[in-house]
Image (cartoon, helix red, strand yellow):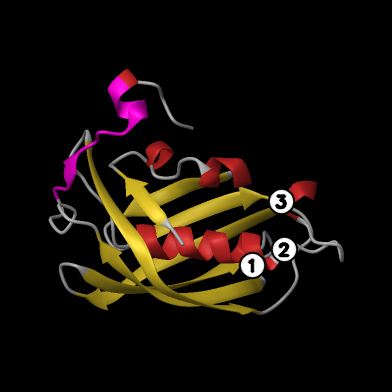
Amino acid sequence: MSDSHCDNTPQQALMGYHELLGMHVVEWQLGRVVVELIIEPKHLNRSGNVHGGVLASMLDSALSLAGLHCDVPGNIRRGMTLSLTTTFVGPAKQGVLRATGTLRGGGQKTYMSSGDIVDAAGNLVAMGEGSFRRRSGSESPQGLPDDTPQAQTNVPVE
């Protein structure tokens, strides 16, 4: 599942696969994150609704990032998904989806988060909960220096 990379700038929180889907972080603070996605035809299944895999990916990202915030410029915290439970509540076909993840508890290494996805009208589309593990060095809120290729070359990640 998710191998989250994050630092103090929302633009660098989601990389690679997340960029492919078109997700971006719009709000990120200690214990809470909001991720958005503008629905495009590539996100739809054969019934014309957003594919469940897209919704699960949004929840995975939001829930994992909720426990990985870092205020230290140039530093990063990494984590990985241990378990993710997703419940699909209603269809979404167009507009903007907003996933909110909230840290619920845990310790230095393992933490639990929950969250939901709503459409532009505020209708509940999906909800989920998961457990995550902070990678070595990411237990501290100060994180570690970002050694990703983007940080090395100072290429902005959008």
Of 3 and 154, the residue lying toward us: 3
Relative vertical location of residue 75 with respect to residue 33 in this rendering, above or below: above
User: In what element is the residue under mark 2?
Assistant: loop
Q: Which mark is residue 39?
A: 3
Q: Which residue is mark 1?
A: 122
Q: Please tell me which residue is depicted at 67% across the width and 79% down the height of the picture.
A: 89
Residue drawn at (33%, 69%), measured in percent from left and top? 132
Q: Is residue 69 left or right of residue 96?
A: left
- Secondary structure, mark 3, is loop
Q: Which label sits in the foreground, 3 or 1?
A: 3
Q: Amino acid at mark 1?
A: Gly
Q: CA distance from mark 2 to mark 1?
A: 19 Å
Residue 102's quadrant in the figure? bottom left
Question: Mark 2 vs mark 3: which is more N-terminal?
Answer: 3
Q: Which residues are magenta?
A: 142-152
Callout in the foreground (2, 3): 2
Q: Earlier in the sequence, mark 2 or mark 1?
A: 2
What's the residue type where badge 2 is placed?
His
Q: Residue 110 location, x and y as percent? A: 24, 71
Q: CA distance from mark 3 to mark 1?
A: 15 Å
Report crowding for label 2: few under 14, some 14 to 19, many 20 or more residues within 10 A (C-alpha). Answer: some
Who is closer to the viewer here, 33 or 41? 41
Task: Give the residue pinned by disc 2.
Answer: 51
Q: Residues within 10 Å of mark 3 (few under 14, many from 20)?
A: many
